Image (tube, rainbow, N blue to C red):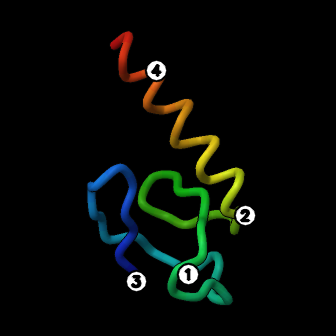
Amino acid sequence: MATAEIMGVHRQISIVLVPEIQVGEYVMIHAGFAINPIDEEAAKETEEILKEVLKYS
């Protein structure tokens, strides 16, 4: 298990599918599971897209 943070929200997630992940690295999360490592650029781009979507929700 690990603690993930996105946009200031902290959640407990399972890292059983990506046991090689290290503190400070970025992962794609689905249904409480880290499913794929991603690079910092992709993580920041995804966060910006989420912020844009939330503006119109």
Question: Residue at 46% across / 20% down in the picture?
Answer: 53
- The nearer-to-camera label among 2 and 1 is 2
Viewer-side residue, 17 vs 8 = 8
Could you tell me residue 3's position as x and y percent?
35, 75
Q: Label 3 sits on what residue type?
A: Met
Where does label 3 land, which residue? 1
User: Of the residues under marks 4 and 2, which one precedes in the sequence?
Assistant: 2
Give the mark, 1 or 3, whose residue is nearer the N terminus. Answer: 3
Q: In the rendered image, which residue does mark 2 sit on?
A: 39
Q: Is residue 55 left or right of residue 41?
A: left
Q: Residues within 10 Å of mark 2 (few under 14, many from 20)?
A: few
Q: In which quarter of the image is residue 9?
A: bottom left
Q: Residue 53 carries which label?
A: 4
Regarding mark 3 in the picture, which secondary structure is present there? loop
- Res 16 label: 1
Res. 5 image quadrant: bottom left
Residue extending farthest top: 56
Q: Is mark 1 on a helix, strand or loop?
A: loop
Residue 46, relative to residue 25: is it above or below?
above
**Viewer-side residue, 3 vs 1:** 3
First in sequence: mark 2 or mark 1?
A: 1
